[in-house]
Image: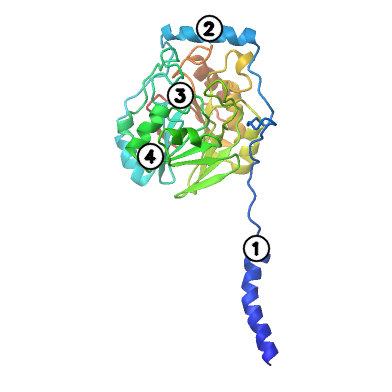
Amino acid sequence: MRRYIILMLLTLVLLPMSLAYGESEPPSMPLFNAAPVGDDGRFTNLAGDLTHGSLGVRVPFILRRMGTYFRGGAGAPLRVSNDGAFLRENARHSKPTVTWIGHATLLVQMEHTTFLTDPTWSNRPSPVPLIGPGRFVKPGLTIDDLPPIDFVLISHNHYDHLDLPTLRLLIARNASTLFFVPMGNAALLRKHGITNVQELNWGQTAVYKGATIHALPSQHWSKRSLGDAHKALWASWAVTGEERRFYFAGDTGYFSGFEEIGRKLGPFDLAAVPIGAYEPRAMMRESHMNPEEAVRAAADLQASTALGIHFGTFDLSDEPLDEPPRRFRNAAANSVFGDTEAWLLHIGETREF
């Protein structure tokens, strides 16, 4: 009898443990592999190192960029007035909205959170501001008119995407704002007093309130000084929740990863894809999509709506400022998006999605 009681007690103790460990699902593996790293310890792309064209292409391009200081803004996007009042009120109720601030900067409200992508308010985000590309259209909202920002997504460390003066303004305004960056970028932010930062590799996730933030592959590169190329990672991002699924491509060339992301995380309600900075193609092809590729990428992502960004705000490449939106509309009209589900916002425009 005593032996029977002991066996019963052991069963009662061990059975819950077997259910909790032996018979439960193992911890889920990341949906995406971590970013590849070369023999030199620097990050690389799924397709390996990218080509940026020959010296015969790059040198004339750089000389042309120096001349953009004198270029006018003909063909730049229109700007509409936005005092931020609706967005500040909506921060409490969180109707899903997207607002184009300019370039790759979006203000998104969803899942009762408010966040920014690649926030850039500087007039000349450049290591040499006096000769860097100038802003043709001022930001769609002022910093002071923004609603409280819960978190920030940064795609990579190029100056027009990781704008330290803007980041310092945001953290001074709200010390609790959280900054999500790809691997290798946190040290730069901390050096400049931004300590509320979290690094993620491709395939890693974080949870903020009811939203899940996914760091995802992209095809690009990183560099802020002469010797630091590829030392920090680049990424695209998705924010998913019970109500909406949003994708931000950041800055990228077209690659097979879009189809994988769409298959594993889609469909998305809204995908923001870059449509500018694609000429000359010999230099830009592998790191910047043209408008037709952007439409294809959004379709690969299984997006209900494609939003064109990363054009017209700064003079970064050879195509006319008004060419990317025109080609984007034409490509979308002959795709699954048609005339209505490929969005081009005015700078400062807010739209529900």
When asked about the image quadrant of residue 336, the answer is top right
Amino acid type at circle 3 is His
**Residue at mark 4:** 149
**SS at badge 4:** loop
Is 22 in front, or is 105? 22
Q: Nearer the viewer, mark 4 or mark 2?
A: 2
Quarter of the rendering occupied by the C terminus: top left
How crowded pointer 2 is (Cα within 10 Å; few <14, some 14-19, many 20+) is rated as few
Q: Earlier in the sequence, mark 4 or mark 2?
A: 2
**SS at badge 3:** loop
Q: Earlier in the sequence, mark 3 or mark 1?
A: 1
Q: Earlier in the sequence, mark 3 or mark 4?
A: 3
How crowded pointer 3 is (Cα within 10 Å; few <14, some 14-19, many 20+) is rated as many
Q: Position of residue 72 (x, y in %)?
A: 41, 9
**Residue at mark 1:** 24
**Residue at mark 3:** 103
How crowded pointer 1 is (Cα within 10 Å; few <14, some 14-19, many 20+) is rated as few
**SS at badge 2:** helix
Amino acid type at circle 1 is Ser
Is 142 in front, or is 110? 142
Q: Nearer the viewer, mark 1 or mark 2?
A: 2
**SS at badge 1:** loop
Residue at image location 69% in from the left, 28% down from the top = 48
Distance of mark 1 from mark 2, alpha carbons? 62 Å
Q: Earlier in the sequence, mark 4 or mark 1?
A: 1
